[in-house]
Image (cartoon, rainbow, N blue to C red):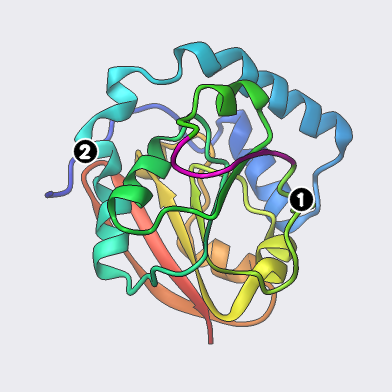
Amino acid sequence: MPVVDPPEMAGGDHPMRKVTRQVAFDGGWDPTRAGKVAALFDGMASEWDQPRRAAEERWAALRDALDRGDVPAGRVLELGSGTGMGTRVLAASGRPPIAVLDIASDMLAHAPPDLAPRVQGDASALPFPDSSVDVVVMVNALLFPEEVDRVLTADGCVVWNHTVGEQTPIHLPADDVADALPGTWTGVASRAGTGTWAVLRRA
């Protein structure tokens, strides 16, 4: 799918931008903030699966990343999975997650139960062993660099996707994701439909 200009939604001053950067770079996460984020998304869960969010152009970037980013079909963990829109794309690509995790229990309640085990949890303390997954997928999600690094195998990869690119309220450029992750990372990035994507690996 060709690149499509996303609708104007979130500028650089969007309040979630500050949260996103603080979480990725400054450890700006505590039980109070976690509770607020969970409550925010719980409150939107019943109306989340609107046609505009399911539009083909929004998911073109994730499909493109899976097609062209050399993403293996190993043990896939999806973080910030919401109501399962990304989970459906992963399953259709032949990469059904071993688990999906979201902090908002109401979001998970609206997710398909048959595609992957649904785990309600905080991505700042993932309930998975060290080096236990080959691919960590995050679609419009907050980045907890230390935990992503911990659960990923040595030759694993991170799939980072924003469905409406720079207009996504929770937006962090691919270069910043690579900088935030422990150690040195390299990868590829592109865009398709309204979205952007990156696939990152340890150098």
Residue range in magenta is: 114-121
Side of 34 relative to 64 (left or right): right
CA distance for labels 1 and 2? 30 Å
Side of 142 relative to 87 (left or right): right
SS assignment for the magenta stretch, majority: loop
Which amino acid type is marked by label 2?
Glu
Vertically, is 37 above or below 23? Answer: above
Q: Quadrant of residue 98?
A: bottom right
Mark 1 element type: loop
**Residue 181: % across, % down:** 65, 69
| Viewer can see residue 38 | yes
120 within the magenta span: yes
**Residue 186: % across, % down:** 48, 79
Mark 2 element type: helix
Residue ID at (21%, 38%):
57
Residue ID at (66%, 28%):
104
Residue ID at (81%, 53%):
27
Which amino acid type is marked by label 1?
Ser
Disc marking residue 13: none
Earlier along the polypeptide chain: callout 1 or callout 2? 2
**Residue 71: % across, % down:** 37, 70
The residue to which callout 1 is attached is: 124
Side of 157 relative to 129 (left or right): left
34 within the magenta span: no
Query: Please, which residue is most extreme toward the right here?
Result: 31
Side of 18 relative to 91 (left or right): right
Disc marking residue 57: 2
Total numbered badges shown on the rendered structure = 2
